Amino acid sequence: MSFFKRKKDSEPQFYATVADGLKKIYEGKLLPLEETYDFHEFVSPQLNEPDFDAKPMVLLVGQYSTGKTTFIRYLLERDYPGIRIGPEPTTDSFTAVMYGEHEQVIPGNALAVDKSKQFRPLSKFGGSFLNRFQCSILKSTVLKCVTMIDTPGILSGEKQRVDRGYDFVGVLRWFAERVDRIILLFDANKLDISDEFRRSIEAIHGYEDKVRIVLNKADQVDHQELMRVYGALMWSISKVINVPECPKIFVGSFWDQQLKHDLYRRLFEKELQCLFDDLQDLPRYAAMRKLNDFIKRARMAKIHAYIISNLKDDMPKMFGKGRKRKS
């Protein structure tokens, strides 16, 4: 276990950015430990250079027709390549909306081999998922700071029995580990949490600090109904997210249409500004988030190494390995 021994009298090293420092430390210290004890096979795949240099990511999760794609369009103030909006489940793919000089749509199979993007590990979910994954590139000032991840609408009722052909919850868990903010969208007219939505929320367990909740289309109900809807949402969320305090809930109608009840205008403007301020702070704290995630990964790798090392020490050197494994 020589990896855990610190070298004495080592001179301090200086780096231009936090990302550069984390890359050097990872390649020189943590990566050898992970490779020695098969950390990538058991716990988490290897980190690549884009994982350190990537912009902050925002993941949007919600049942179909809750306004996830419309929310992104509202932030960007324009359509993006490949956008589809409708009352039925229209977004059937994971879509990464990123900045670029030339508008284009990059399919998932090409993203899986692109060394400049951070999505290469997603190839482990198979070809069925890669056929349902794409990247929309467009020139937008918002995307210079963040990357938006749109997800397929989570199904309810009989529709949720249809097999997607890939591990949907596993993909959500992969993104939840790497994004800076997770936005759960709810429709004020349908607050029911389906079984698939419940599994999706449980998949982000451990990352509740990243979660923000948006009660969308709130102008479709009057003020008395809005109070009841808000209370019902709080009660429903408390049954799924096991945290002492409920995540922050933003109320509004995030689209460019006229409000049905103009009485909410001032409230919605304040809620919108609070949400925008929260998203605008992501680039400022991105380095701190990467450092925090790196420390968590280092601790996990160290614990994993101790466990594997102890198991190896307990195994017989010559005979009886099969009997020892069964015991």
Image: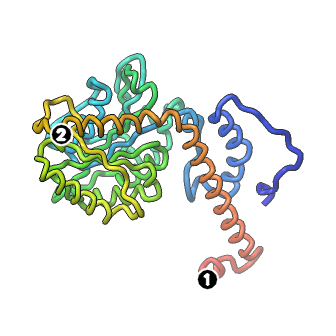
Q: Measured from the top left, where is residue 310 in percent x and y?
A: 71, 70
Above or below residue 136? Residue 173 is below
Quadrant position of the C terminus in the picture = bottom right
Instruction: Say what amino acid the circle numbered 1 marks.
Output: Ser
Q: Which mark is residue 264?
A: 2
At label 2, which amino acid type do we have?
Answer: Tyr
User: In the rendered view of the protein, which quadrant contains the N terminus?
Assistant: bottom right
Q: Position of residue 271 (x, y in %)?
A: 30, 40
**Residue occupying image coordinates x 69% and y 28%:** 16
Q: Which SS class for mark 1?
A: loop
**Residue 146 to residue 68: above or below:** above
Image coords of residue 189 (percent x, y): 14, 50
Q: Give the camera-side residue of 249 and 145.
A: 249
Is 281 on the left or on the right of 325, as rendered? left
Q: Nearer the viewer, residue 271 or 209?
A: 271
Q: Which residue is mark 1?
A: 327
Counting every numbered tag in the picture gives 2
- Residues at marks 2 and 1, CA–CA distance in whole angstroms: 65 Å
Q: Can residue 216 be seen here? A: yes
Q: Tell me where residue 263 appears, x and y as whole percent.
A: 14, 38
Left or right, 75 with reference to 319 = left
Is mark 2 in CB contact (under 8 Å) with mark 1?
Answer: no
Q: Earlier in the sequence, mark 2 or mark 1?
A: 2
Q: Nearer the viewer, mark 2 or mark 1?
A: 2
Which residue occupies 35% across, 57% down? 201
Residue extending furthest right? 9
Residue 129 image-quadrant placement: top left
Mark number, residue 90:
none
Q: Residue 193 sits in which quadrant?
A: bottom left
User: Residue at point 31% right, 51% down?
Assistant: 165
User: Which colouring convention does the figure follow?
Assistant: rainbow
- Is disc 1 surrounded by few (<14), some (14 to 19) or many (20+) residues within 10 Å? few
